[in-house]
Image (tube, rainbow, N blue to C red):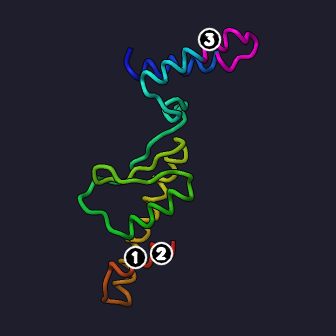
Amino acid sequence: MDKNKAIERARKLLAMAADSSSPNEAVIAARRARSIIDKFQINNYDLEDVSDFGISSPGKARTKIPQWEQNIAIVVAQLNDCIANIERGKFQYKGFSEDAEVAGFMFLYIVENGKRTCKEFMQSTYNGCRNSFKLNYSWAI
């Protein structure tokens, strides 16, 4: 039995153990679940039902991600109850599938708006450092 099958088996046994209609069967199921959990070193996170969770990866992969985009990614993750991290040069939002999707769209919208606003500002009034504008933009968000 591999670990994934063991996790499914432990979930089913724990569900049987939670059923109070037959206390003897519940005790036996709990013991079997405990032995599987110990044998395969399964933790609580493994036992959680993650069918509602999803990952959103907005944008394209890059070798270097600017600090201002990282700041925005963190704020967007907090607003949408997600976790933001960078894998293989690309942002990922992890959380409930709907929240992760919204976070991805929100991130892309805010970043594109920041780039457009910076371009307009640079053309109209200022010939300075784009990075300073974008960094201050991310802090204002």
Q: Which residues are magenta?
A: 17-30
Give the SS element for disc 1.
helix
Q: First in sequence: mark 3 or mark 1?
A: 3
Q: Main secondary structure of the magenta part?
A: helix
Distance Cα–Cα, label 2 vs label 3? 56 Å
Q: Amino acid at mark 3?
A: Ile
Residue at horizontal 52%, vertical 51%? 82
Q: Amino acid at mark 1?
A: Leu
Residue at horizontal 39%, vertical 48%? 57
Q: Which mark is residue 135?
A: 1
Q: Residue 66's x, y, as percent?
A: 32, 68
Residue at horizontal 33%, vertical 78%? 131
Q: Amino acid at mark 2?
A: Trp
Report the residue marked by disc 2: 139
Q: Kindly give the residue lying farthest to the left in the view shown.
A: 63
Give the SS element for disc 2.
helix
Report the residue marked by disc 3: 28
